[in-house]
Image: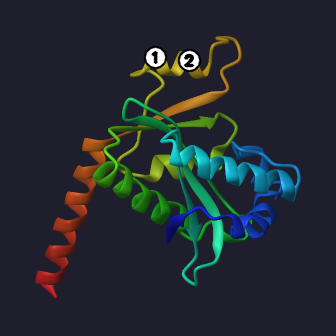
Amino acid sequence: MLKIREIYESHVLFDLMNHPEVFPYVRQKAYSHDEFLFLTKQTIEAEERGELISRTILDEWGNPIGTINLFDVENKTGFLGTWIGKPYHGKGYNKLAKDQFFQELFLELGIETVWMRIRKENIRSQKAAEKLPYVIKANEIRPLVYRALNPDLQNEVYDLYEIPRDLFLLHLKRTDIQEEIQILEA
């Protein structure tokens, strides 16, 4: 489902990213294939320096369909950035990618908190985030982070969401227990 980013996927990912329902919400925008190739090389180099974590999202046949990233990695935290190509919307890839990515971040890489900033007009992403049982809307409980994202009080652009390591791990434990119960009942 996820793999480390590679240059050869750039053409397919660039085509998917440019859809008008995807492009406005992509953090690393590229207006040409060459620019996307350059951004991908920069992303790979930034990951090698420990500045971000980036993975390609794959469908069940191993085709690249989007990316999931942890940007601005600092003090065991970072900001999530995810996009999936329009043909793959509504098929469950978002939740699967996030679950797998969070397991890697929290269990293997020592991340403690993942932040999500979602544009207030991006209803699709807000609904997707709020479906996840380990996500907390954090506008009011993390006012310093929220104000850093929205310095202009008259023009607030983003909602803030938080995924704490402990809440995600609790979700994993609950999921394991539910699976064990289903096996015992079968």
Rendered image quadrant of residue 151: top right
Which residue lies under the disc numbered 2?
Answer: 148
Near-viewer residue (3 or 143): 3
Please tell me how many numbered marks the rendered image carries: 2
Q: Is residue 78 above or below residue 18?
A: above
Rendered image quadrant of residue 71: top right
The earlier-in-sequence mark between 1 and 2 is: 1
Q: Secondary structure at mark 2?
A: helix
Residue 105 visible to an observer of this rendering: yes
Q: Secondary structure at mark 1?
A: helix
Query: Looking at numbered disc 1 in the image, what kind of residue is underneath it?
Result: Pro
* Colour pattern: rainbow
Which residue lies under the disc numbered 1?
Answer: 143
Query: Looking at numbered disc 2 in the image, what kind of residue is underneath it?
Result: Ala
Query: What residue is rendered at 22% in x and 51% in y?
Result: 170
Marker disc for residue 102:
none
Q: Is residue 77 above or below residue 61?
A: above
Q: Is residue 176 left or right of residue 77?
A: left
Q: How far across and down, in percent of the image, does residue 101 sit?
A: 43, 57
Mark toward the viewer: 1 or 2 = 2
Query: What residue is rendered at 21% in x and 59% in y?
Result: 174
Query: What residue is rendered at 64% in x and 71% in y?
Result: 64
Query: What residue is rendered at 63% in x and 48% in y?
Result: 43
